[in-house]
């Protein structure tokens, strides 16, 4: 069984999946959402959960630098609650402070991604970082 990682934003959700052994994370797609219209892409996430035989989901929790919960973290918690109603699997939160910044820095350093290309993949890369951090911290 695999673990899914999600980077929940206000316009997209980056999706990553672990290998069957839980060693590595790979980005699989970015799902468009619209918080204002309450369209969260939950049906697509549910499809991916079934397709990849996911046993748990890790969602990035963007805490403030002082460890408090701000509006984006609250939005991630609400997203987790909505998703849990549909998929009925354990959902774990992973501190994701600065992962999007790290992901963008990594893409810039690679040098082959224009700003437009980075914008399209940044959430997927952040989801990989969130999931990989979780996998690394839970190795037995």
Image: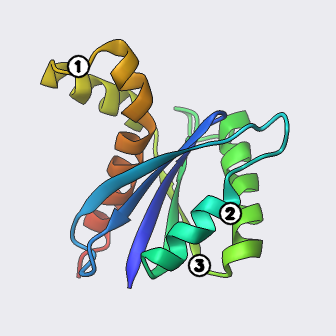
Residue identified by numbered label 1: 108
* Residue 66 percent location from the top left of the image: 56, 34
Residue identified by numbered label 3: 90
Q: Earlier in the sequence, mark 2 or mark 1?
A: 2
State the CA–CA distance, disc 3 to disc 2.
17 Å
Relative height, residue 86 to residue 114 (above, below): below
Helix, strand, or loop for circle 2?
helix
Q: Are marks 3 and 2 in contact (CB under 8 Å)?
A: no
Which residue shows up at 68% across the image and 81% down it? Answer: 88
Disc number placed over residue 38 in the picture, else none:
none
Q: Is residue 8 left or right of residue 15?
A: right
Residue identified by numbered label 2: 43
Which residue shows up at 64% across the image and 33% down it? Answer: 11
Q: Considering depth in this image, is 10 or 100 the residue closer to the camera?
A: 10
Helix, strand, or loop for circle 1?
helix
Single out the mark in the foreground, 3 or 2. 2
State the CA–CA distance, disc 1 to disc 3.
34 Å
Helix, strand, or loop for circle 3?
loop
Q: Considering the image in quadrants, where does the C terminus appear?
A: bottom left
Q: Residues within 10 Å of mark 2 (few under 14, many from 20)?
A: few
Which residue shows up at 83% across the image and 34% down it? Answer: 36
Q: Considering the image in quadrants, where does the N terminus appear?
A: bottom left
* Residue 133 percent location from the top left of the image: 32, 56
Q: Considering depth in this image, is 41 or 92 the residue closer to the camera?
A: 41
Q: Is residue 68 left or right of residue 119?
A: right
């Amino acid at each position: 069984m695999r673990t899914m990682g999600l980077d929940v934003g206000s316009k997209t959700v980056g999706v990553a999946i672990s290998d069957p052994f839980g060693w590595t994370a790979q980005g699989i797609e970015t799902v468009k959402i619209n918080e204002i219209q309450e369209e969260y892409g939950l049906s697509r996430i549910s499809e991916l959960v079934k397709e990849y035989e996911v046993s748990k989901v890790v969602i990035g929790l963007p805490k403030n630098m002082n460890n408090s919960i701000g509006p984006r973290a609250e939005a991630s918690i609400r997203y987790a609650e909505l998703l849990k109603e549909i998929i009925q699997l354990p959902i774990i939160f992973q501190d994701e402070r600065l992962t999007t910044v790290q992901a963008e820095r990594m893409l810039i350093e690679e040098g082959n991604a224009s700003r437009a290309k980075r914008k399209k993949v940044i959430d997927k890369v952040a989801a990989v970082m969130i999931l990989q951090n979780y996998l690394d911290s839970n190795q037995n």
